[in-house]
Amino acid sequence: MKLLYKKGRMSMELTYSPQGDYLLPNLTLSVAETTIGKYGMMRKTFLKTERKGMYAHLMLSEQLNRHLADIDRTAREQIDRTIQELLTSRPAPDKASDPLAWTGHMNNLKQQAEELILTELIYH
């Protein structure tokens, strides 16, 4: 069964297949091969719980994966840039002589950079 839906300039043709007593639409999402990292998954969770309308719009317009990949890429770039800026103002101790202090310092810088990015980019 085919149904043609027109609204303004847009038109959409849906096909249905019988499933028992019901006709269900044949819907498929085009799956793009994009990897979504930590920050993209955090954004997805935020959209699902706090911005349900935006999540539904992105998903139905097949832009969700691209949006999440863009957010993830941008977040990683901004975190790297922020860490480099923080390193110029707060240099790390020598890694060879005190590796634990260097690791602690770098983790601290990463946490600071990540906190800035999460409030500005992920949870906005």
Image: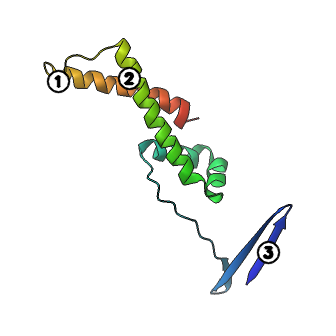
Q: Which residue lies furthest to the top in this view?
A: 89
Percent across and percent down for residue 124 are 59, 35
Which residue is label 2 attached to?
84
Q: Answer with the quarter of the image where residue 8 lies.
A: bottom right
Closer to viewer: mark 3 or mark 2? 2
Q: Which residue is drawn at 45% across and 28% down?
A: 115
Spatial separation of the CA atoms under disc 1 and disc 2: 19 Å
Which residue is label 1 attached to?
99
Give amino acid for label 2. Answer: Gln
Q: Which residue is drawn at 45% across and 34% down?
A: 77
Residue 74, compared with residue 18, is above or below; it is above
Which residue is label 3 attached to?
4
Spatial separation of the CA atoms under disc 1 and disc 3: 66 Å
Q: What element carries label 3?
A: strand
User: Around disc 1, counting alpha carbons within 10 Å, would you say few (fewer than 14), some (14 to 19), or many (20 or more)?
Assistant: few
Q: Can I make out residue 45 in this image?
A: no
> Is residue 25 shown left or right of residue 113?
right
Percent across and percent down for residue 118 are 49, 32
- Marks 1/2 in contact by CB < 8 Å: the verdict is no
Labelled disc at residue 15? none
